[in-house]
Amino acid sequence: MYRADDQTGMFPDPLFKSYNVESIKLGLKENWKQFTLLVLVNMMVGGMVGLERTVVPLIGTETFHIGSDIVLFSFIIAFGVVKAFTNLVSGVLADKHTRRKVLIWGWLAGLPVPFMLAWGPDWNWILLANILLGISQGLAWSMTVNMKIDLVGPEKRGFAMGLNEAAGYGGVGLTALLTGYLASHYGLRPQPFYIGIIYTFVGLLLSIFVIKDTRKHAQLEARQVKTTLSGEKAHKPNLLWVFRETSLRNRNLFSVSQAGLINNLNDGMSWGVFPLLFLSLGVGLEGVSWIKAVYPIVWGTGQIITGPLTDKLGRKPLIVWGMFVQVAGHILIGLQLFNPLTSGLLGSILLGLGTAMVYPALLAAVSDAAHPVWRASSLGVYRFWRDMGYAIGALMASIVGSYFGLMWAVHLAGMVTLVSGIVVWVRMKETR
């Protein structure tokens, strides 16, 4: 499966120049201080998305009186498309510059976002804020993923991704809950967005003064790997080659990419649909904030368990069964088997649990299949497809909701999730 271009395992890419190997070690125990700091930073990165989960759709309907679902969900579409393309280039930027520099750029792009959400005079300001948020997330979250993978090496990838995504989506859920509480007591703007101002300044200061770059850890791993994937050239391939390999040619990477897209399609759908749907069913704003918070909180904290589990059981079982658990969540919400609040909470728990099973396994599977020389770029391509799911899910929900009602957006998301899980079951081979 792999081959070396020489017996030292060195690659003729200037990125992988010689350095003092003795000063760099791979492993969670060896790098726990930087790893912990990156977990804290990613919690704040996720919190920036959590600012919008409960409040922004309601700002559109109640503050700016938007009646069109497509216009209302346009902020999610803008966020998803911009984040997807930023993910695509983030790995290239990280290899050309450093992981730490790109992380700092991500925070700088996010600085204006909470101010624009809190005081923007019209909907165009919300759209512009989400374009900046997409850039910020594409750079900052991508770098926390790459940096943790660099630090721990190949043995603990699932565990590392579990902690990374637990922190990020835990931040999403807790912030969604807190903004819903603040909005119910103080109004939709500006108080709920004060939290984001704190996140941006603390995250930026930590990234500038405390976080250290990890590219040399990736260099060390590349020296240790004697071979390259699928018989390709030993030197670092260009982005077009990596895009084709990750998107289509490698059946494992294709399976992972489409599953990631459908996962975030579900998230993009729920982001726009759930606040409006459950308010229309008679659930109060605090109840809606709990429904919106439970999904990412379970998704985030669950990965503390599912991350290490994918290192033991393999990637494929968690991906396949995680997709099917998400289908069960859609069924519970779509059929409204209980009262709306109970159905929403239980369905969101299942959606969060299924996503917790899938998320670290997907990232670890990409890291397994991609050589360290082009792993950052491959992760960027995977995250391109995954986060394009936000835009596709929001667009799908807006069109289906306009013609058939918001509940049918939930039904359709469940159907495509079922198909996606079957694709992984049939096409993917275990990568661990």
Image: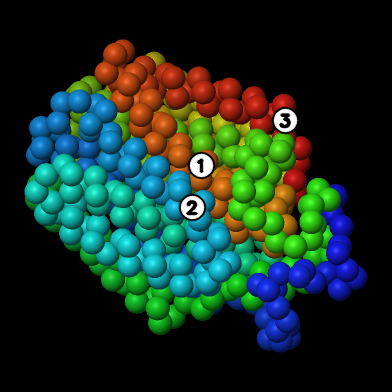
Q: Is residue 226 visible?
A: yes
Q: Is residue 417 above or below residue 117?
A: above
In the image, residue 333 sits, relative to residue 316, either above or below, namely: above
Checking the image for residue 4, the label placed there is none
Marks 2 and 3: which is nearer the front?
Answer: 2
Query: SS of the residue at dot 3?
Result: helix
What residue is pinned by disc 3? 427
**Residue under pointer 1:** 386
Which badge, 1 or 3, is on the more N-terminal residue?
1
Rendered residue at 39%/47% (across/down):
82
Judge whether residue 342 can be spotted in this image. no
Alpha carbons under labels 2 and 3: distance apart = 25 Å
Residue visible at 56% across and 23% down in the picture: 418
Relative to 347, 261 lies left or right: right
Tell me the tag on residue 87: 2
Calculate the distance from the C-alpha at mark 2 to the C-alpha at mark 1. 10 Å
Q: Earlier in the sequence, mark 2 or mark 1?
A: 2
From the viewer's perspective, is 292 left or right of 87?
Answer: left
Please state which amino acid type lies under the numbered disc 2.
Asn
- Distance of mark 1 from mark 3, alpha carbons? 18 Å
User: Do the residues bearing badges 2 and 1 touch, measured as CB atoms within 8 Å?
Assistant: yes
